[in-house]
Image: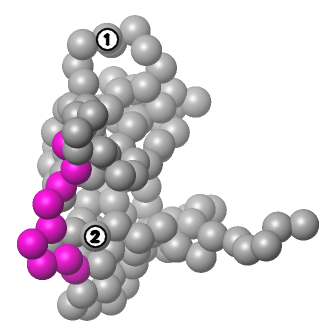
């Protein structure tokens, strides 16, 4: 028996509405909320929430002296197709060296690392 269940995954960012919109476009759902707290109920998944953080400094990946702090693994059917879509939405690639792996690493518009993973 577990002690708790996950209620939400919360990411600090400079613009909660913008980052919620990015993730809603990537994983589905609709941004809900205003100001310093905007959330997206992911269809069939957890609540993603975005909290305003003045002075937010994004993690650096990979950087042993500046931990990534957190990242999301997002499962996709086709890595090439998904990559084109997240790049068009504002993601930027963080690791383009090995295209044979079953995952690719990106940063969201606020700088948080996330992976697209072949399922």
Q: Secondary structure at mark 1?
A: loop
Q: Residue at x 39, y 52 (%)?
A: 70
In the rendered image, is residue 89 in sight? no
Q: Is residue 28 above or below residue 50?
A: above
Give the colouring mode of the picture: one colour
Circle 2 packing at 10 Å, graded few (<14), some (14-19), many (20+), is many
- Front one among 55 and 5: 55
Q: Is residue 25 left or right of residue 101?
A: left
Q: Is residue 77 left or right of residue 3?
A: left
Q: Main secondary structure of the magenta part?
A: loop
x, y percent for residue 36: 24, 87
What separation in Å lies between label 1 and label 2 (alpha carbons)? 29 Å
Q: Residue furthest bottom?
A: 34
Quadrant location, the N terminus: bottom right
Q: Which residue is mark 2?
A: 12
Picture disc at residue 109? none
Identified at 27% across, 52% down, the residue is: 112
Q: Is residue 61 above or below residue 7?
A: above
Queried whether the magenta region covers residue 93, the answer comes back as no
Work out which quarter of the rendered image holds the C terminus and state it.
top right
Residue 59, magenta (yes or no):
yes
Which of 112/66 is in front?
66
């Amino acid at each position: 028996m577990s002690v708790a269940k996950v209620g939400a995954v919360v990411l600090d960012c400079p613009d909660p509405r913008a980052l919620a919109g990015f993730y809603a476009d990537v994983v589905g759902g609709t941004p809900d909320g205003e100001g310093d707290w905007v959330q997206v109920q992911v269809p069939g998944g957890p609540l993603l929430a975005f909290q305003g953080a003045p002075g937010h400094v994004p993690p650096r990946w990979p950087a042993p002296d500046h931990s990534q702090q957190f990242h999301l693994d997002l499962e996709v059917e086709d890595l090439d197709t998904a990559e084109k879509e997240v790049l068009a939405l504002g993601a930027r690639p963080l690791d383009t060296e090995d295209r044979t792996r079953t995952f690719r690493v990106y940063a969201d518009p606020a700088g948080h690392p996330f992976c697209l993973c072949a399922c």
